[in-house]
Image (tube, grey):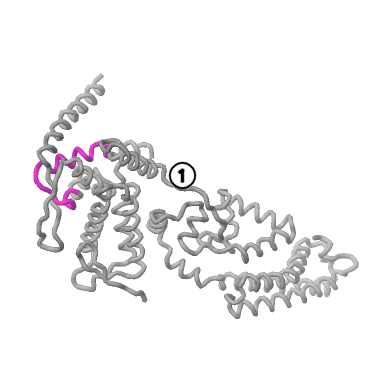
Amino acid sequence: MYVENVKSQMRKGMLEYCVMLLLDKKPYYSSDIIDELERANLIVVEGTLYPLLSRLKKEALLDYEWQESPSGPPRKYYRLTSEGKAVLKALEESWQQLVGTVEGIKRL
Amino acid sequence: MKKSFNVNLGGRIFQIDEDAYEQLSDYLVSVKTCFRNNECGEEIASDIEARLGELFEARVSAGSARIITLTLVNEMIARMGKPESMVDDGEAAGGAAGEKGNDAQEAAAAAADGYVRRVSMGKKLFRDGDNKVLGGVVSGLAAYFNMNVTLLRVIAVLLFFLSTFWAFLLYLVMWAVVPLALTTTDKLRMQGVEPTPENIAEKLAYEEPAIDKIVRNLKEVDNSGISTLLVILGCVLFISTFIGAAGGYFTFSLRLFPLVLVLCWIGTISVMAIPVIAIVLVLSNKWKGLSASVKWLLLIDWMLAIVQVVVLMSLLGASHFSPLSFM
């Protein structure tokens, strides 16, 4: 129980960063983001993604455009804005720092 | 047989069973309620709806009728997660200053606290039909006083024996008077949880949707349970009359057998209690809900009880022993 709790905290912290990493590569449809995150074991229930996307959009870090889909209704494709890319860069640095810190402590 | 409707879920048309529809619409309402403080709440809710549509699309086979069942809805709801757990706590920590931030913080805190926060006022005594042995009186009381059901049941059984018939009568009166928790709202209020849309949806989604059970309970006054009980009582009375008669015939002393005393009590209690129960049932408007067989069984049991008491008392000798003296 405790372990699960800590794990889920860690995942939560990383989720945002990982979503931005994904969107940096190419525009993504939300369901494809979910597939990627599920494959990486980063998300437990799908519902968490939508508020996160909405918040990033509010912060103007990402944007979406509607695209026709071969089957079913049109889909929103999300991608990073230039502001988002800048924030991602900053996050990148702090992630490297975190990794460095953890590795450093392990080596002590 | 189930009614079914056509629904448009995020731009896709499905056929959906009535129970599944109610479940799904409760869920979507609770999602909306949960994000009501978020300015993009509508958009989030419609994204989630679209995703659900997509998930259902993948699951209903293209060839046959595109019917969404309750099982499927529950599966997908479990996959999407509770609305509370979706509320983004980054919202509270980051950006959004002022009142909006506070609202979000509060919502997130409430979500984290879970039930504790939402337990408040308005706890009401119900009989718990989902968790019953006889009438659900004790489990209802346990929910009301926040006690362990098993412990309370043990106490109840002890009381049954120690108080002779008082506890038994009290139980019957409560069975008749205390309402059964039928709807989800009732069940939530039984536990002291406020019946808000999100709590109702959560209860429906995560504590096994009991729609079939609700339907069964609506037809209640639980005739089959009562008849079983009455048949057992009738058998006990009938057999004990024979034991008594045999005892009289072989002239062994019945008073040496404590069991016989217990049987005497049962007979005497039945003689007095059955008319009382009948009156209480009539007064609480439940008499009409009883099936004809239950009414006949009540009458038969009452007559058997009278016969038993007369036989046993005459054999034991009313001057030496009266079961009434033990009360």
The quarter of the displayed image where residue B63 is located: bottom left
Quadrant location, the C terminus of chain B: bottom right
User: Does the magenta-highlighted stretch encompass residue B256?
Assistant: no
Residue B177, horizontal then vertical, whole percent: 62, 64
Q: Name the spot of residue B231 as percent of width and height, x first.
A: 64, 73
Give the labeled residue for mark 1: B116
Residue type beneath disc 1:
Val
Is A94 left or right of B249, judged from the image as shown? left
Quadrant in the picture for residue B316: bottom right
Residue displayed at 75% across by 70% down: B272
Seen at 46% across and 66% down, the residue is B213
Of B17 and B121, the residue lying toward us:
B121
Which element is circle 1 on?
A: helix
| Quadrant of residue B199 within the rendered picture | bottom left
| A104 w.r.t. B277: above or below | above
Pinpoint the chain carrying mark 1: B
Start and end of the magenta stretch?
Answer: A8-33
* Residue at the spot 47% in from the left edge and 63% down from the top edge: B183
- Side (left or right) of B121 relative to B59: right
- Quadrant position of the N terminus of chain B in the picture: bottom left
- Which residue is farthest front? B98
